[in-house]
Amino acid sequence: MKGTVALAAALILAGLSTGDAPPAASPKAAMDETPTIREPRVVVSKQARELALYDGPTLRKKFRIALASDAPGRKEREGDRRTPEGTFYVCTRNAGSRFHKFLGVSYPGPDDAARGLAAKRISKAEHDAIVEAHRTKSCPPWKTRLGGEVGIHGGGSGRDWTMGCVALENDAVDELWATLRLGDPIVIEP
């Protein structure tokens, strides 16, 4: 009896009675229980100004984005203030970026390298280095006349302002940072 009284007193102090169930999880706890994304994929729509995060074929979330100030058309060269288009992957991660966090996009890709070689913007050796980087899923050369150092980063999505990157609000980049790993696919559509 003495143990039962002590247990009842402890439950009352904890906000429960002997017949009560534990309190419901808070909304924050429910958000923390979001299932892990096992097959992350990012699709950026330049025209819609949104980034969609998928888990395999399932859309998980959309984010508003800002792009380069001269966004129409695909990136062709360094300084053209355009965001690339095509199929890429996360090639680097920088938690100390001046734009909050930075997820590097593997631009230029093999198609960009082929166009750049045909236009005589890059050498055959640069072309081959870009193709090899994509074969091994490493970071392609960023210091060519095609440009580089394009990424997904924070800094705000209220207006177009980047030099070719995809910008989001810092909290949105935090979500992507927690999900995306090196090699995860990124598609950038017109």
Image (tube, grey):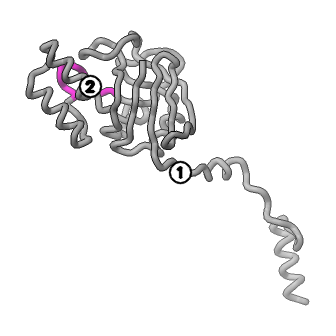
Q: Secondary structure at mark 1?
A: loop
Circle count: 2
Q: What are the residue bounds of the magenta stretch? A: 142-150
**Nearer the viewer's eye, disc 1 or disc 2?**
1
Q: Which of the 4 quarters of the picture holds residue 6?
A: bottom right
Q: Residue at x 79, y 60 (%)?
A: 23
Tag 2: amino acid = Gly
Q: Which residue is mark 2?
A: 148
Q: From the top left corner, tell me how far across and down residue 44 is, in percent.
A: 45, 26
Q: In the depicted view, which residue is nearer to us: 83 or 14?
A: 83
Q: Which residue is mark 1?
A: 36
Q: Main secondary structure of the magenta part?
A: loop
Q: In the depicted view, which residue is nearer to us: 108 or 10?
A: 108
Of mark 1 and mark 2, the one earlier in the sequence is 1
Q: From the top left corner, tell me how far across and down residue 8 is, in percent.
A: 87, 77
Q: Is residue 20 above or below residue 137?
A: below
Q: Residue at x 25, y 26 (%)?
A: 108
Marks 1 and 2, how far apart at CA: 31 Å
Taking the image as shown, residue 11 lies to the left or right of residue 73, namely right
